[in-house]
Amino acid sequence: MKKIEAIIRGNDFERVKGALQQMGIVPLTAYPVQGRGVQGGVPPYDLLPKMKIEIVVKDEDLGKAIDVIIRNARSGTPGDGKIFVIPVQDAVRIRTGERGNEALY
């Protein structure tokens, strides 16, 4: 299992969320954040509004999920965002006690 943390433009969020749902990845956490990358034209201490999406996926879905996020969040201009991938040791569905992949989606 892997955790994907994607920081994207806010106006891309609904498109990314819908595309992930179409591939069967419905559970996600999202919230507004502020940050900056190294893009030019922005004063060095200004923070820009973004959305952060967190999802945990099965190893076999990782590549597809990343591709879906890129296809739906890429404009080709600086500030499109970043994707981080983090290993996940376990997941537990509290309601049923299911563990691992069975607890995901």
Image (cartoon, rainbow, N blue to C red):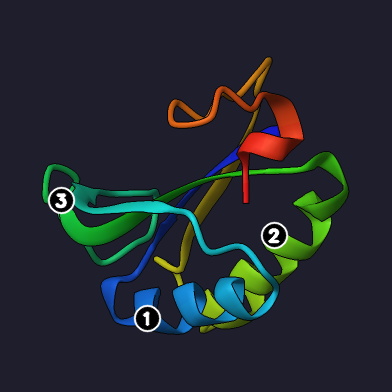
**Amino acid type of the residue that numbered disc 1 sits on in the rendered structure:** Glu
Gap in angstroms between the C-alphas marked 1 and 3 = 22 Å
Q: Nearer the viewer, mark 1 or mark 3?
A: 1
Gap between marks 3 and 2 measured at Cα: 25 Å
| Front label number (3 vs 2) | 2
Image spot of residue 73 (x, y percent): 51, 76
Query: The disc labelled 2 sits on which kind of residue?
Result: Ile
Task: Give the spatial CA distance, label 2 vs label 1.
Answer: 16 Å
In the picture, the disc for residue 66 is: 2
Position of 103 relative to 78 (above/below): above
> Which residue is under mark 1?
14
102 or 26: which is nearer to us? 102
The local secondary structure at tag 2 comes to helix
Q: Which residue is mark 3?
A: 47
Which element type, helix, strand or loop, lies under badge 1? helix
45 with respect to 85 (left or right): left
Left or right of 83, for residue 53: left
